[in-house]
Image: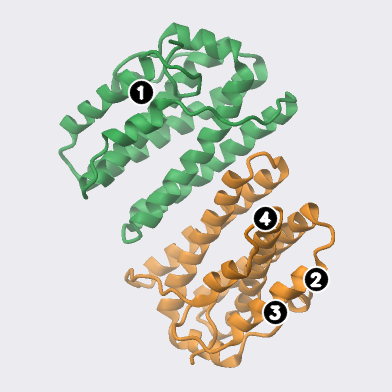
Chain colours: A orange, B green
Amino acid sequence: MTIPAPIEDFLGCRTPETWVRMAKQRLPELLLDHANCEKKAASTALSLMFRYPQHDKLATRLSKLAREELRHFEQVSRLIRARGIRHARAPVSGYAAGLREACRNNEPGRLVDTLITGALIEARSCERFALLAPQLPADVAALYRGLLASEQRHFEVYLSLAREFDARIDNRVAELVAVEAKLASGPDTVFAFHSGPPA
Amino acid sequence: MTIPAPIEDFLGCRTPETWVRMAKQRLPELLLDHANCEKKAASTALSLMFRYPQHDKLATRLSKLAREELRHFEQVSRLIRARGIRHARAPVSGYAAGLREACRNNEPGRLVDTLITGALIEARSCERFALLAPQLPADVAALYRGLLASEQRHFEVYLSLAREFDARIDNRVAELVAVEAKLASGPDTVFAFHSGPPA
């Protein structure tokens, strides 16, 4: 399964092979963390809708996006149930916190950076689904192939919203792409859907 | 348009006529607050999913419920746009805060009370949609007729979840029904979708 070209072009690095091997070995943890990521993605979209209620287009697009994330949450949860995987606390990798830290605190930079990091997270998810699908059991692979197209769409939604609030974001995108690439490929102490490879 | 019997039986009082008259006069504010309520309803469901991640059935049902709330948010937002209503800060009535205050702080009481108040809010919304539909312009009335059935379903989802965590909730339900009835029918300083009638 190939990584969609716009995603491969956007990301600063390919996910290391060692992460993919680890994911294959730790499928229950991967799925539990994946379910949690879908819930967090819906929550992030919703909190943007609350933070910027005056932006009608942002609210409408992110509302649809949040609905899709919740549907994915339900799909992954169904798979988790079908496989008899028991609930466990989701691990906390430094990925999301690292991206949050890199975001500016003052508006409009805060909004633009949050949208760019949204695009980055969706792009990374899309890339990892493509890398994982050929390696994982048929039921998971089928789900991941289905999710891939949505993640690519979500990536585009976030990036086009970022451009609406600031037409000249290329330099800032490049900076955040570099931050994300480091987080996704540097050695990590925990294993999670967006973590780096094992330290 | 009649109020569904299970809703009328559940609620502790009928919404006063003075509130309905006020809503008719202040349609733009009603719609803006309604959109905000749908967003808050999705957010409440999502925060319960985060607070109780181990409850699989709760997560699955509330995820679907949150998706429906977001779809309603999009529908009301479309109507707001079509009517050329400009964004304004949503008013804060004492309704939600009053219900929150009445909830117990310790588990499992906290979960059960949150679910019962969820049922109450959905029931009150359902009742008000039924009361408002015959009074409002055709486009709003059509939407409200459509939403009524979902709100009744959401009321049932919350109440049946509450019963799953505590089979003997009748006394507690009666207490919270009384609190809600007072909030929805007592004089209020602001006008909102769930406020009491004008003071």
Amino acid identity at mark 1: Ile
Same chain, labels 2 and 1: no
Numbered circle sitting on residue A111: 4
- What x and y, as percent, mark residue B2? 44, 14
Would you call the spot at circle 3 few (<14 residues within 10 Å), some (14-19), or many (20 or more)?
Answer: some
Circle nearer the N terminus (3, 2): 2
Q: Which residue is mark 3?
A: A178
Label 1 CA crowd tier, 10 Å (few <14, some 14–19, many 20+)? many
Q: Are marks 3 and 1 on the same chain?
A: no
| Measured Cα–Cα span from mark 3 to mark 1 | 55 Å
- Frontmost residue, B191 versus A67: B191
Amino acid of disc 3: Ala
Give the labeled residue for mark 2.
A171
> Which residue is at the front of the view, A50 or B144?
A50
Report if the CB atoms under discs 3 and 2 are less than 8 Å apart: no
User: Could you say where residue B10 lies in the image, as x and y percent from the top left?
Assistant: 29, 23
Mark 3 chain: A
